[in-house]
Amino acid sequence: MKALEVRVGQVAAKRLEREGWHADLIDGLIGASGGPKWLILGRLDRVLMSDLLSGRSKPLDAVGSSIGSWRHAAMAQVDPCTAFDRFEDAYLSQHYTSTKPAVSEITEVALWLMNTLLGEDGAREVAEHPWLRSHIVTARGKGLNGLRPGVGLVTGMGLAAVGNTVSRKTLGASFQRVVFAPDSASHPSPLLDGFGTRYVSLTEANVFNALMASGAIPYVFEGVYDIAGAGKGAFWD
């Protein structure tokens, strides 16, 4: 079995035949969500940043939510491999006081993980990277889904879930997609469609909270409220 299999379409194959591999060949990255899978994908990310994309000159739009956006945050730091190593060590050593931890404890651990991932200068480096333009995807709760935890929020999430079983189009009444991205990034993102999207400038001041919101699964850990530049309300994964 091969360790890695690369599949390309006809157009991509022709470009590779004509140009060979070079750092400016890729126009966009999509960061896969799904928690622990990043432990494998993070190894590929290290290779991308230390070798395959080394010396890139063109802007690269990196779109992700949840762990996908967290991976991009590591990639965008001055020393991405060190950022990945730091985050991996913390991720593998996280622990909880209960086999069924409360939302508050999970949130506390998630905040610690994010602080570890970004380190002292990571937020600035993500916002100001010369060519990796992070698009951090979140969902702003509308109506009941923008409330603090309580009966109203439970009701709102329940109604959204029921509506989604009927049609994904109903989710627009419950949530608005909010993407945090540098002003220089492609708007709208070429990798997002099918849902109303609002763009907010990604700055050093909101990188941390935007990343936390992108992974804030309702009832797993707490939503993020009133993010700088994005206005009032709750922001979720």
Image (spheres, rainbow, N blue to C red):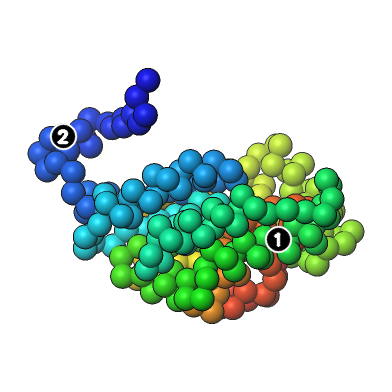
| Residue occupying image coordinates x 54% and y 41% | 37
Q: Secondary structure at mark 1?
A: helix
Identify which amino acid the numbered label 1 is placed on: Val
Q: Is residue 133 visible?
A: no
Identify which amino acid the numbered label 2 is placed on: Lys
Q: Position of residue 212 (x, y in %)?
A: 62, 63
Q: Position of residue 111 (x, y in %)?
A: 66, 65
| Residue occupying image coordinates x 51% and y 76% | 120
Which residue is disc 1 drawn over? 109
Q: Is residue 156 above or below residue 11?
A: below
Which residue is disc 2 drawn over? 14
Q: Secondary structure at mark 2?
A: helix
Relative depth, front residue between 123 and 87: 87
Q: Position of residue 21 (x, y in %)?
A: 18, 43
If the image is split into quadrants, where does the N terminus sit? Answer: top left
Sequence-first disc among 1 and 2: 2
Gap in Å between the C-alphas at discs 1 and 2? Answer: 47 Å
Q: Is residue 160 left or right of residue 37?
A: right
Whether label 1 touches label 2, CB < 8 Å: no
| Residue occupying image coordinates x 67% and y 47% | 170
| Residue occupying image coordinates x 17% and y 38% | 16
Q: Is residue 10 above or below residue 221?
A: above
Residue count near mark 2 (Cα–Cα under 10 Å), binned few <14, some 14–19, many ≥20? few
Residue count near mark 1 (Cα–Cα under 10 Å), binned few <14, some 14–19, many ≥20? some
Q: Position of residue 6 (x, y in %)?
A: 31, 32
Tell me the mark number nearer the camera, choosing from 1 and 2: 1
Residue most extreme to the left = 18
If the image is split into quadrants, where does the C terminus sit? Answer: bottom right
Q: How many marks?
A: 2
